[in-house]
Structure formats: C-alpha cells, structure tokens
Amino acid sequence: MKKLFLSLLVISVFILFSVYVFAGSITIQWDANTEPDLAGYCVHYGSSPGEYTERVDVGNVTTYCIEGLIPDTYYIVVTAYDTSDLESEYSNEVSGEVKNLPPGNPVGCKVVDIIND
C-alpha cells in the first residue's frame, strides 16, 4: 500500500493540467494514473488557496466539468484512489477564475496559472 501512495504522489506531482474557464463552470483535465488498482479520481476545489471545501468523486475519468459556480477564483486539486479506497496526496494546485459575464456572451480562457508548493 505504501508503494501505491508513493506512486500516486509521484504521478500527482507530474500531472499536467489544462483548465478552461467559462461563465459558471471550469473544466479540468489531467494525465491518467497507470496503477493497476486505480479505482478513480476526486476533484477538490475551493475559493482559497490550499482550502478545498468541495470534493467530487468523478470516477475513472480524466476530464471533469465543475458547474454551477458563482463568479470567483477557484483553486483545484485532484486525488486518485485505489480499489481499497485509499486516496493519494493532492496533485499540484491550479486556479481558474469564473467571471461575471453578461448573459448570452460565454467567453472562455485557458488558465495557465499553476501553483507549485
């Protein structure tokens, strides 16, 4: 099990994120974990760096759209979990901003702000 956590930690450090922001939603994408007992991923997010008030089990996918967001800056990390329900450390943190746009004008931007602690 220790090997799994170390592997997940190493993989999470090297995750490459692509984050696209639209009014009210953020889509996040990451590289897959290759551990044979991988069961899925959780996306954690919140409006303060390092403080994740929301946790969503997204299953075994590598892209997820967080919807229903109010205008704010969100800080996001991903964890992987195995078939024994053991969860990895947080990945690198990324951030994205949901802007208050006028109705009917959905404009997206690619966020390249990656925060390495």
Image (cartoon, rainbow, N blue to C red):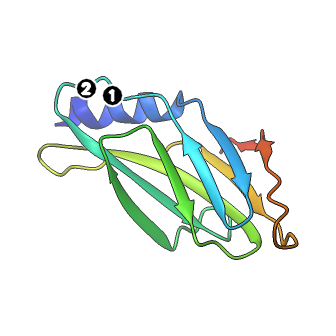
| Residue drawn at the location 36% of the way across and 40% of the way down | 61
From where the camera sits, is residue 88 visible? Answer: no
Q: Pinpoint residue 15: horizontal percent, then vertical percent.
A: 53, 31
Q: Quadrant of the N terminus?
A: top left
| Residue drawn at the location 61% of the way across and 62% of the way down | 50
Circles 2 and 1: CB distance less than 8 Å?
yes
| Residue drawn at the location 48% of the way across and 60% of the way down | 44
Residue corresponding to mark 1: 7
> Is 113 left, or right, of 76 in this rendering?
right
> Is 11 left, or right, of 93 in this rendering?
left
Residue corresponding to mark 2: 35
Q: Spot the residue most to the front.
A: 104
Q: Pinpoint residue 105: horizontal percent, then vertical percent.
A: 85, 62
> Is 80 left, or right, of 13 in this rendering?
left
Q: Pinpoint residue 12: horizontal percent, then vertical percent.
A: 46, 35
Which secondary structure lies at badge 1? helix
Asked whether 9 or 82 is in front, the reply is: 82
Which secondary structure lies at badge 2? loop
> Is 32 left, or right, of 110 in this rendering?
left
Amino acid type at circle 2 is: Glu
Looking at marks 2 and 1 on the same chain, the residue that comes earlier in the sequence is marked by: 1
Snapshot quadrant of residue 62: top left
Q: Pinpoint residue 102: horizontal percent, then vertical percent.
A: 88, 72
Asked whether 96 or 63 is in front, the reply is: 63
Amino acid type at circle 1 is: Ser
From where the camera sits, is residue 75 visible? Answer: yes
